[in-house]
Amino acid sequence: MPQSSNQHYYYIRLIVELFFFMETPRRPCTYSFGENGTTAIVSPSGRLLRITQHFPGHPCGYCVDHSSILRPYAVVDRITPFLSSINDPDHTIGFFPDQEWLGSGAEGISVEMKDYRWPFFKVNRSTGPVDIQYFVSEGVIHQTFTFENGLPDMALRTNMLIRELEFSTNENSFNNAGFEDYYSTQPLGDHRCIQRVHGNVVLFIAAYVENIAVVFKKNDGTGNESNDSETYHVDLSGAKYPNSLSITFVYALELFMANSPHHMPTRFLLDNPPTKRAFLNLDMQKERPFTAESSLDGCLRLNLEHILSVCSIPVYPDAESNDDPAIAFTCGDVDDHRVATAASFSYMAERIRKLLKGHLKWLFEEDYRDLASDPSCPHIWVNGKEILNWKDSEYFPPASLVDAPFHLIKAGDFFEYDQGKTWKVPQSAGIAFQTWIKELDPKNKLGSYAFPRNMDDPTHSFYLTDHVLIWRAIKAAESLGLKSCLFVDITPEATREGDKGGQSSKKPEQRHYSSTKIQNQILKRFTAENPVSKKRMLSVSRSPGHIRFLLRTKDTSLFHAMDCGFFDKPGISSTADEWHNKIDIWKNLIDCQRLHDDNDDISWDEPVRFALSVAIAQKGRCINSLPPQEMLKRAITVLMDSSWDNGLFPGQLDVNGEPAIYNEELIRDKYWSNTFEVPFTLWKFMQSSAKAPTTDPSQQHKSTPVTTQDPEF
């Protein structure tokens, strides 16, 4: 699926930060894994639920779905039944033991993520355990079963559906095709391979025991393809194997040219079985911990690996390209790899660097996202191209003021850590910044560096976090050496028209954007007196009729800005107390949070707000009546208790504090943004065991008055 810029930013920041650098309850969840654009989802019991594959030169990928799952266009009606049916034994697209055999003696299932990446299931049975291991190699899904008491009946119903992950239109003939006319299933290679065909996309399935391809037999009495009960079984009748054996099923999704013959992939040949994965089995505890909380540390490692393995999709301009791929970041395969705009182990170092460099390539090169041509487009395919006609659809949120800044900040952040060692700033980055400034300047109200969120609203509203992110993007340009790109020509049109007839003595007028100028204007224009405390402080939003001092859920970015020095007092160096050199209007804003009734955490239903409270508590401040350390413990407990067994955090909680999925398509991007912002915030503010000293608000310096005379502020 395409990506929202803020979602994109948070997991980019997570893996950039990690590069340098409480037990959870059991609840049913899916487990995603992948490599190089091939991903899969398995159920809590180890059943294969979905396979996804991206192909060079195509805007989006393809997937294999169970027949009960609706096509990608039906966003909410697709994801809801998918997640609600994960415990259904009939919901599977892969081979699996007979349910009666498996269920009669099963005593429980345990799950482990090998190398924090590959799902490994152990089904405990009274007659002996069954192990199920998944991994991906060279575009092939491997599913290995190990039995101690012989092979049970293993069957597969072939009525699965192959879909293009195109969700922008309901008029997709490929996805709307029915079984009767567009699907076929045939055995190949003396019945040692099954191919499921839909158009030019083919799913191949084979199986091996001791590196020898096994034979499949079709269920007797099966009719034509329109009868969706066609079933294949593993046939070991002609071979003798010990009771204790392993059988590996392999699945590969291939795309062929129109009218070309379908053939098994070369890495899938029956006389040369795919190589078994050699797991690293590294002792991660020997690596630098991300946080002192051991279970939280494990959660963050799982989140990192999910981003690197599942959410990172290599993108090539065409099938013939031999260059290193660009990298698109998506929300993952549960929601069809929607592109969203919003880690350090020694063996991962090169992998992370390559991924981040690939993403910057995806952002700036003309073949992909090409920020220089349209920095603010929020809805794009995995290949970086704009989703056509998104502005005409009610299901796509409008462009945001901070879509472009989120992307541009990523370049500055990586360059800050890399220091130009492996990534050179491309010329297109300067063009992208200049294009963005030209887009931004018409929203610069009265030339005062105040940017309303929506210029078309009759009453303009201004948000502190929006302005801080713009400031950070400007800082990124300056750190990249692109300061000369931060200006616009504001010469009056009449003057320019008059100059066409001859040389003019007047110099063109320009408006320059600098981080210092914008910072000063933000601090000036967002300062107001709080009518309750009678103290002057920053506001988080302003409009002619309303000033807000209660931090919003998305205001965690303000604490990242704090670490970047945005709220520092000029000329005062930092000390062990990180609040020592912060301006009073910022400290007053944070200290007034505990006075707001809306900060009662009992009513919170967004995990990202608990993450915000972690950031505030780790800074030694109170978000509500609870002391910082008590709120910290409370927030971590809620977040860990609401996380799934796969280590991922939900984007929303229900009334009982349980993880919930979105129920409206328009909040889909926000939901996935939250799922990535939570782990980033936790790592960012939990990595240090040192706690910021708490200062009694009554002992703080008096605020310095700042005048604000603009009526609209």
Image (spheres, helix red, strand yellow):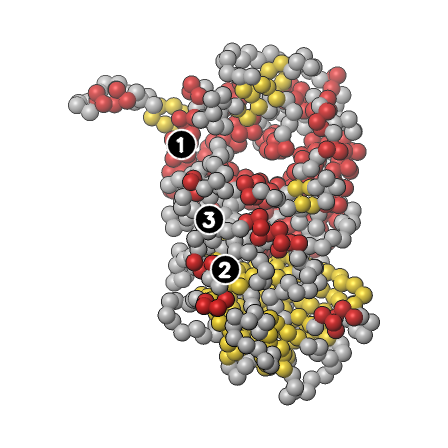
Q: Nearer the viewer, residue 439 or 546?
A: 546
Asked whether residue 267 appears in the rendered view, the answer is: no
Would you identify the image quadrant in which residue 505 lies? top left
Give the label on residue 163, or none.
2
Q: CA distance from mark 3 to mark 1?
A: 26 Å
| Residue at 52%, 27% in the rendered image | 467
**Which secondary structure lies at badge 2?**
strand
The x, y position of residue 643, in whole percent, is 71, 47
704 horizontally vs 55: left or right: right
- Give the foreground label among 2 and 1: 2
Q: Amino acid at mark 3?
A: Ser
Q: Is residue 365 left or right of residue 421?
A: left
> On the image, numbered disc 3 is attached to which residue?
168
Pointer 2 local density, CA inside 10 Å: few below 14, some 14–19, many at least 20: many
Q: Label 3's element?
A: loop
Name the disc covering residue 439, or none.
1
